[in-house]
Image: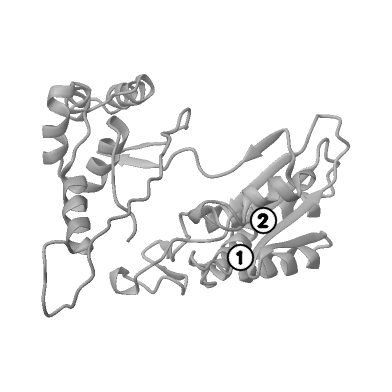
Amino acid sequence: MDWKPIIDEALRHLKALLRFDTTNPPGNEILCAQYLRDVLEAEGIEAQLLEAAPGRANLIARLAGSGRAGGPLLLTSHTDVVPAEPGHWRYPPFEATEADGFVWGRGAVDMKQMTAYNLAALLMLKRSGATLTRDVIFAAVADEEAGCRFGSTWLVDQHPELVRAEFGLNEVGGFQLHLGRRYLYPVQVAEKGFLWLRMTVHGEPGHGSMPHDRNAVVKLAAILERVHRRQLPVHIHPVAAAFVREAAETLGFPAKPLLYALLQPMATHALLKILPDRDKAKAFNAMLRNTVTPTGL
């Protein structure tokens, strides 16, 4: 099989998807959904565009199989992205610039690349004329970044028959890690949970020209500063410990003793403070303890 034209086509679709500003909020995922519908229908694949709210569109398509192998395989991804501040980007976040061996754009990693992969897979299956032994469902959903109310949750509640499947492939189970001279390709076997909390602070109104000590904004700022400085204890889950040990054995010296030392709770925090690669330090910090962070005001 000649993979180059397949990869080139997938890259073209990825760039097109990246150029749609689907920042959530407000989402506006209908831009991607309409594009995907047009591509699929041009190949003779029927696609359903379902809006949970104006502009909050989900796209579903299906290749029918015999069912001999079992229930459907669901290929799913989301088309909304988190906000991007252009001033912090090397290249504009919604122009899909190809440079330095990469495609740059908000959503290139999370997760329009998966939408492009899934689209390429569906097109290949359709063009091959292969007889499928199970249905293959393509789902590009809205609103993953802000709680899934207009995306996967809505689909499961309102149209469960469209997405019910025996197996599913979704977001990546782990990002490629470049440690020393080696590349590690992790496989996800567990995931941290999360708890959303909303804090409301009350104060007394007044005029900006006459400040007082019952200002709600000042109270909130003080609380957030305490939250920011609060480090929860090191809490090394057995799954995280197994990952670190396997990475240590794979990488060998000089990384091995450092990684094993990270598993000693008395030393973990100090070692994370001095790791020269701050991105990896942040990743290990989140892996080896529970964290608290404010995300919006």
226 over 289 or under it: above or below: below
Precedes in sequence: disc 1 or disc 2: 1
In the image, 69 versus 284, the foreground residue is 284
SS at mark 1 in the image: helix
- Could you tell me which residue is drawn at 22 percent across and 41 percent down? 281
Q: Characterize the local packing of mark 2: few (<14), some (14-19) or many (20 or more) Cα atoms within 10 angstroms.
A: many
47 over 234 or under it: above or below: below
Residues marked 1 and 2 touching at CB (< 8 Å): yes
The amino acid type found where label 1 is placed reads His
249 over 202 or under it: above or below: above
Q: Characterize the local packing of mark 1: few (<14), some (14-19) or many (20 or more) Cα atoms within 10 angstroms.
A: many
| Residue 9 can be seen, yes or no | yes
Quarter occupied by the C terminus? bottom left
The x, y position of residue 175, in whole percent, is: 42, 43
The amino acid type found where label 2 is placed reads Leu
Residue furthest out toward the right: 66
67 over 50 or under it: above or below: above
- Could you tell me which residue is drawn at 74 percent across and 50 percent down? 158
In the image, 186 versus 183, the foreground residue is 186
- Could you tell me which residue is drawn at 75 percent across and 44 percent down? 160
Residue 13 badge = 1
| Residue 2 can be seen, yes or no | no
In the image, 267 versus 174, the foreground residue is 267
The x, y position of residue 294, in whole percent, is: 29, 51
